[in-house]
Amino acid sequence: MAKKILIVLYYYYPYISGLTIVAQRVAEGLATKGHSVTVLTTRHDRNLAAEEIKNGVKIIREKVLFTLGKGVVAPSLLWRAIALSRVHDIVKFHLPIAEPALAALFIPKSKIVTQYHCDLNLGAGIIKKIVEKLSFALMKLLLWRSKRVIVITKDYFASSHFKAYTKKAVAIYPPMEVARFTLPKEQAPKVQAACFTIGFVGRVVAEKGLEYLFSAIPYLEATIKNFKILIAGDYENVAGGSVYEHLKIFVDRYPHRIFFQGKLSDKELVQFYQEIQLLVLPSIDPLEAFGLVQVEAMLCGTPVVASDRPGVRDPVLKTGFGLLAKSKDAKDLALQITTIYREGAFLKNGDYFKEFAIDRVIERYEEVFDV
């Protein structure tokens, strides 16, 4: 039966992150199944409309009072969430979130579903740490009031601040347009095998650990004669600040190795995955909870080297299509990259990708809402 679903989160379209991509795909997927979907979010960019409809989803944006690193403070989200909850069957909160979590005290528990993405880290500073602790307390309140908690992997959730709520957890992978990551053979770009191309896809932010990938270059040069590292992703318009300036020291040192490509279109991204020989995800922080780019690369036939961290290690462990490296260890990262260079990698479990198909994922969400 069609439901009225309210989704509450800090960032949404057109802001791009792993969290917002998942939120948008799920919201639009639910809308295509006949559900009435409203997204309540922040107007983090003043140029955005206060209200609009995007692909069948109504988007309402509330004013941001101020920001703390990547975090935003928007008190009106709380009052609006309470008001809108009265005319919706399901209220789905995305964590991390802070003050809107108080709305859970005024919404029937039977309506509340929470989706946990990652832990919160606002950075250094006394004020930020105080806000962080307060946010964790509010999120625990929200989880206590939730009938179910949707997580990407139980591996990551079990290592989080909220592991006490594991019994409520339901693991659902992020939805993907699986077919989009396979080009017809006549369109497939030619691979320059003479140069081993290492790729990275994502925002250029601290938790991605790019400095460890760049610090691995001297170790790689000892075994791989000809290689380059291509960085695809936004390094300018990033909430909380890009670390591009911090990384320029490596670019200046290795101008023949490191190349920033900027943000790619959907078509360019698929071509990028097919052109590189290896995708590397050297994540160093709990803010990285999964890394959907790994699955995208694997679907394009490209193996992965990822950090051996909860959640992030899931695609490699489940498919065998790559290797895991110690987090914050440039030497071990280079060793795993070199192993792939010498020995290659082979997909062992193709059925894994079926769980990412949009129809399957939306079906899982509907099952949770019907509980």
Image (cartoon, grey):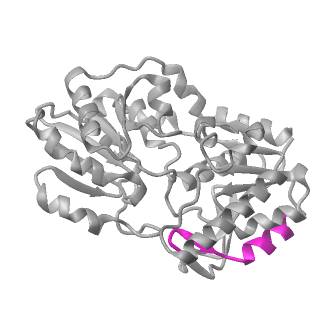
Q: Quadrant of the C terminus?
A: top right
| Residue 271 rendering spot, x and y as whole percentages | 31, 41
Decide: is 239 above or below 288. below
Decide: is 221 above or below 90. above
Residue 107, picture quadrant: bottom right
Decide: is 167 above or below 77. above
Residue 33 in sight = no
Residue 56, picture quadrant: bottom right
Q: Is residue 318 left or right of residue 254?
A: right
Given the current orientation, which residue lies at the most extreme front position?
126
Q: Nearer the viewer, residue 5 or 257?
A: 257
- The residue located at (10%, 32%) in the rendering is 194
- The residue range painted magenta reads 68-85
- The residue located at (65%, 42%) in the rendering is 151
Q: Nearer the viewer, residue 351 or 139?
A: 139
| Residue 190 rendering spot, x and y as whole percentages | 20, 33
Q: Nearer the viewer, residue 130 or 249?
A: 130
Q: Nearer the viewer, residue 68 or 113?
A: 68
Magenta-span inclusion, residue 194: no
Q: Is residue 363 left or right of residue 96?
A: right
- The residue located at (73%, 72%) in the rendering is 77
Q: Quadrant of the N terminus?
A: top right
Numbered-mark total: 0
Decide: is 256 above or below 339. below
| Residue 297 rendering spot, x and y as whole percentages | 39, 36
Magenta-span inclusion, residue 78: yes
Residue 96, picture quadrant: bottom right
Given the current orientation, which residue lies at the most extreme left position?
225
